[in-house]
Image (cartoon, helix red, strand yellow):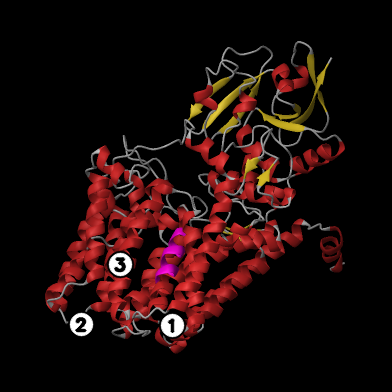
């Protein structure tokens, strides 16, 4: 009898609940045993020896993590929320953590878009999104078979392994790449002449980057990990390019740099790209100054570089040409359109009060009355210990009586963006500096990353002793100030207990940075700190097994069967129609009201010939649908900046080419002129499929 479930799975693709539960238990056991083994090795051999071993085999270890995630078919997606919205147990396939309702941009948009691509052969334009084929490459983070996909390596899993395993690769590959890229970058900026010292502080810095609350809450949205991977890897390769004399090596380094340039450019989120580009300029300038006496580039190197640049330009030009119409439409939308930000409005305390964001996975965010920060994603930040890095950098330069180019550049950059965020610039200056797409809240990324770089580098460069008692007192005072800042900035969220915990965490972080690599106690403290950062970061997103909550819903399977029997465009009506529309698209069903990244003006103008409502539907939009018995005076009703409701009759549906409706309403009991709805399937999860009939 024990063979039956295995046969069901291998032959028929079926998995019983019992088998599913056992599989989840096994995955939990494997993860727990791996963590336990790592802790045991640290206790037996010491964290320093284990750390050196991991450093030596870091790339193999990273590849092993990705391989294990793909083999176990686990990701960090909040797909379990589909079970919640359809009235099922959202924790049924969750190995660890909690699916986040807040992450709609991930489980309602990004992941469904990626899965929808498998039904069109990963084409550049996807015809499942209503009447207008959707550009899947330029606007949304979806896998596409095109030469320019070389700039998006984390999509390769989808193209090679398919949707489910591709999702596992996408989540694990980006996290491993971000951690290793950060680690290599910190080794690069803290060591001279290719040395491999300061590994402990580099691990701390990489942990503060990869497992930062801001990274994890924004993980699957707007490609922030890709931006940072591109910045860090390009700087490491640029330093090697300037010093390595081997032509083959330089060819590879230049190729990787251009790959990173394409990856960075195609993230297509200027609010983060522009500030990080400023940071990249500082790092490039420092690298040139640092390696100035060692730069020897031959004519052969210049020729090879020119060829690589031409290939790069050709690939980017292919994207621009293919997606030109999409870009033009997006630039002229009512939302998001073109921003005209001039900064200002951000509180200095918001920049300081970041430690409390470590608690966001465990305590629901309580917004401050009247504040613009409304959810965990928006309040999340990097734990950067600002302004400790600046203080240490200045102290180092005073002690050495020498200006450090990188630290000076980073301090200037931090002051610049703090001024922009807190005070603001005149609009004309903001335009000159290309900062109009950057809102004050989005400067959190560049400020956090710059502060962490400054902190890591300043600690690694310290070659003088300080008064330990004085430092201890200063650390305690600083921790108290940080705790107070967290409480004062977010009084409804950070109570007395979390204020005390914030102080304790700050002291631990300070102690870890100031003592790591200097004695065993410091190494243990640093290990505990890294463990705490990892646990907090990994608790933001769940560990999700498989993709059944999105791909094996009985409701969706019925719609797929009906679509095969009688093809036609669908629309979702009633409760949660915006979400369910994307669920259908993710499973290969053409749906009119699936999210419109770029508006389908031709379709909507059929209901709005005089274009009075164009400002409502000319936008990036979720579309909810309400079918009415009589035509509404206003068929388009704006709900939010990125959502409108379509109030529509059967006659209007027919005009738009809709044949089938999935609805929470009893459409067959309603009266329409010249039309009726016929139920063509069972009611599942409160939704009934109907066929639109003209009589």
**Residue pictured at 42% horizontal, 79% vertical:** 298
Element at badge 1? Answer: helix
**Residue beneath label 1, please?**
51
Q: Residue 463 carries which label?
A: 2
Say if mark 3 contacts mark 1, CB within 8 Å.
no
Magenta stretch in the rendered image: 226-235
Tell me which corner region of the image, top left, top right, bottom left or bottom right, holds residue 450: bottom left
Q: How far apart are marks 2 and 1 (CA)?
A: 23 Å
Out of 246 and 350, give the one closest to the viewer. 246
Tell me which corner region of the image, top left, top right, bottom left or bottom right, holds residue 589: top right
Which dot, 2 or 3, sits closer to the camera? 3
Which dot, 3 or 1, sits closer to the camera? 3
Give the mark nearest the N terminus, 3 or 1. 1
Identify the image quadrant of the N terminus: bottom right
Q: How far apart are marks 3 and 1 (CA)?
A: 32 Å
Res. 685 in view:
yes
Which dot, 2 or 1, sits closer to the camera? 2
Out of 323 and 502, give the one closest to the viewer. 323
**Residue pictured at 47% horizontal, 78% vertical:** 300
Crowding at mark 3 (Cα within 10 Å: few <14, some 14-19, many 20+): few
On screen, residue 4 versus residue 252, left or right, reads: right
Res. 99 in view:
no
* Residue 640 image offset from top left, x and y in percent: 48, 30
Give the mark nearest the N terminus, 2 or 3. 3
Element at badge 3? Answer: helix
Q: Is residue 165 above or below residue 111?
A: below
Determine if the magenta segment contains residue 69: no
* Residue 152 image offset from top left, x and y in percent: 56, 59
Q: How far apart are marks 2 and 3 (CA)?
A: 25 Å
**Residue pictured at 83% horizontal, 41% vertical:** 561
**Residue beneath label 3, please?**
285
């Amino acid at each position: 009898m024990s063979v039956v479930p295995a046969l069901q799975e291998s032959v028929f693709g079926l998995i019983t609940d019992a088998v599913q539960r056992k599989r989840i238990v096994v995955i939990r056991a494997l993860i727990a045993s791996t963590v336990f083994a790592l802790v045991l090795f640290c206790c037996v051999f010491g964290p320093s020896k284990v750390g050196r071993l991991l450093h030596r085999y870091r790339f193999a270890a990273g590849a092993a993590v990705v391989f294990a995630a793909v083999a176990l078919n686990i990701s960090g997606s909040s797909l379990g929320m589909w079970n919640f919205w359809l009235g099922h147990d959202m924790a049924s396939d969750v190995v660890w953590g909690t699916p986040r309702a807040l992450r709609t941009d991930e489980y309602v948009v990004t992941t469904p878009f990626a899965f929808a691509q498998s039904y069109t052969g990963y084409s550049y334009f996807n015809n499942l999104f209503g009447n207008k084929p959707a550009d899947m490459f330029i606007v949304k983070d979806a896998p596409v078979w095109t030469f320019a996909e070389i700039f998006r390596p984390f999509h390769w899993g989808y193209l090679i392994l398919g949707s489910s395993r591709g999702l596992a690769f996408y989540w694990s590959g980006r996290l491993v790449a971000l951690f290793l890229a950060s680690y290599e970058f910190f080794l690069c900026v803290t060591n001279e002449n290719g040395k491999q010292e300061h590994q402990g502080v580099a691990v701390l810095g990489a942990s503060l980057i990869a497992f930062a609350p801001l990274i994890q809450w924004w993980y699957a949205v707007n490609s922030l990990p890709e931006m940072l991977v591109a910045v860090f890897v390009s700087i490491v390769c640029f330093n090697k390019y300037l010093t390595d004399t081997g032509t083959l090596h330089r060819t590879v380094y230049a190729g990787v740099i251009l790959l990173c340039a394409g990856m960075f450019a195609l993230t297509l989120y200027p609010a983060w790209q522009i500030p990080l580009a400023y940071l990249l300029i500082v790092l490039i300038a420092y690298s040139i100054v640092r390696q100035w006496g060692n730069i020897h580039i031959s004519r052969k190197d210049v020729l090879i570089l020119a060829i690589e640049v031409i290939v790069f330009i050709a690939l980017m030009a292919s994207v621009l040409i293919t997606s030109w119409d999409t870009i033009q439409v997006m630039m002229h939308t009512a939302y998001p359109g073109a921003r005209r930000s001039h900064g200002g409005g951000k509180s200095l305390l918001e920049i300081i009060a970041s430690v409390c964001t470590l608690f966001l996975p465990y305590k629901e965010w309580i917004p401050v009355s009247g504040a613009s920060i409304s959810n965990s994603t928006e309040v999340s930040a990097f734990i950067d210990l600002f302004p400790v890095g600046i203080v240490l950098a200045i102290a180092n330069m005073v002690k050495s009586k020498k200006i450090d180019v990188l630290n000076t550049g980073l301090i200037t950059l931090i002051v610049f963006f703090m001024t922009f965020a807190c005070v603001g610039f005149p609009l004309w200056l903001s335009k000159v500096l290309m900062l109009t797409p950057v809102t004050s809240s989005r400067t959190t990324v560049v400020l956090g990353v710059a502060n962490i770089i400054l902190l890591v580098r300043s600690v690694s460069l310290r070659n003088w002793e300080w008064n330990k008692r004085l430092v201890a007192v200063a650390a305690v005072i600083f921790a108290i100030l940080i705790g107070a800042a967290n409480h004062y900035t977010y009084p409804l969220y950070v109570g007395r207990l979390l204020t005390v915990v914030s102080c304790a965490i700050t002291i631990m972080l300070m102690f870890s940075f100031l003592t790591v690599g200097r004695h065993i106690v410091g190494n243990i403290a640093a290990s505990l700190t890294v463990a705490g950062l990892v646990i907090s970061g990994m608790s933001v997103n769940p560990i999700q097994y498989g993709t059944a909550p999105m791909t094996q819903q009985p409701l969706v399977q019925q719609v797929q069967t009906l679509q095969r029997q009688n093809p036609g465009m669908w629309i979702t009506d009633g409760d949660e129609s915006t979400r369910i529309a994307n669920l259908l698209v993710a499973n290969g069903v053409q749906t009119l009201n699936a999210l419109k990244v770029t508006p389908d003006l031709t379709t909507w103008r059929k209901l709005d010939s005089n274009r009075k409502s164009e400002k409502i539907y000319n936008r990036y939009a979720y579309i909810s649908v309400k079918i009415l018995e009589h035509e509404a005076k206003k068929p388009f009703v704006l709900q939010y900046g990125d959502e409108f409701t379509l109030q529509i009759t059967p006659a209007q549906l027919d005009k738009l080419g809709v044949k089938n409706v999935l609805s929470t309403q009893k459409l067959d009991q309603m009266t329409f002129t010249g039309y009726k709805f016929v139920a063509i399937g069972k009611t599942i999860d409160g939704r009934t499929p109907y066929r639109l009939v003209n009589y």
